Image (spheres, rainbow, N blue to C red):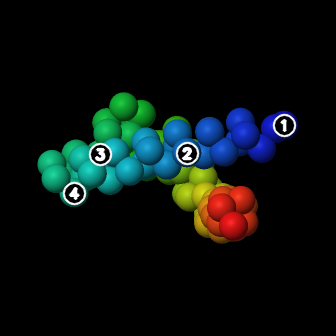
Amino acid sequence: MDNRYLAWTCLTLIVIGAINWGLIGFFQFDLVAAIFGGMSAWVSRVIYALIGLAGLYALSFYGLMDRHRDRVVSRDI
């Protein structure tokens, strides 16, 4: 599997998680739980777990940003 597709999938899951947390924070409404039958439903738990794993994978993006910055800086010199 190409890392690019994995990165896009993880970013999509992170955006879904961020929107869900925003809804929880502003309106006390859990969209994932509302769609999939409550927080304790197995589908909701799987989605929460996938979003959590995507967030952990996204930590590696910091290293990619440093490498990209180094390439841009070295090109400008």
Left or right, 8 with respect to 35, comes to right
User: Disc 2 designates what residue?
Assistant: 11
Q: Residues within 10 Å of mark 4 (few under 14, many from 20)?
A: few
Residue located at (34% from left, 46% from top) = 20
- Residue occupied by mark 4: 25
Q: In 3D space, how far apart are the residues under numbered discs 2 and 3 (Cα atoms)?
A: 20 Å
- Nearer the observer: mark 2 or 4; the answer is 2
Rendered position, 24 above or below 64: above
Dot 4 falls on a residue whose secondary structure is helix
Image quarter where the N terminus lies is: top right
Looking at the rendered structure, the kind of residue marked 1 is Met
**Mark pair 3, 4: CA separation:** 9 Å
| Residue count near mark 2 (Cα–Cα under 10 Å), binned few <14, some 14–19, many ≥20 | some
Please name whichever residue, 48 or 66, is drawn nearer the observer in this view of the structure.
Answer: 66
Pick the front one: 42 or 71: 71
Label 1 neighbour load within 10 Å: few <14, some 14-19, many 20+: few
**Residue 11, percent from left and from top:** 55, 45
Indicate whether 71 appears above or below 41: below
Q: CA distance from mark 2 to mark 1?
A: 16 Å
Tell me which amino acid carries mark 2: Leu
Figure quadrant of residue 75:
bottom right
How far apart marks 3 and 1 lie (CA) works out to 32 Å
Label whose residue precedes the other's in the sequence (3 or 1): 1
- Return the residue at label 3: 30
- Give whichever of discs 3 and 4 has the lower sequence position: 4
Who's the residue at 43% across and 42% down the image?
16
Disc 4 residue type?
Answer: Gly
- Asked if one can make out residue 49 in the rendered structure from this viewpoint, the answer is no
Q: Which mark is residue 1?
A: 1
Question: Which one is in front, 75 or 40?
Answer: 75
Compare marks 2 and 4 and give the one earlier in the sequence.
Answer: 2
Q: Nearer the viewer, mark 2 or mark 3?
A: 2
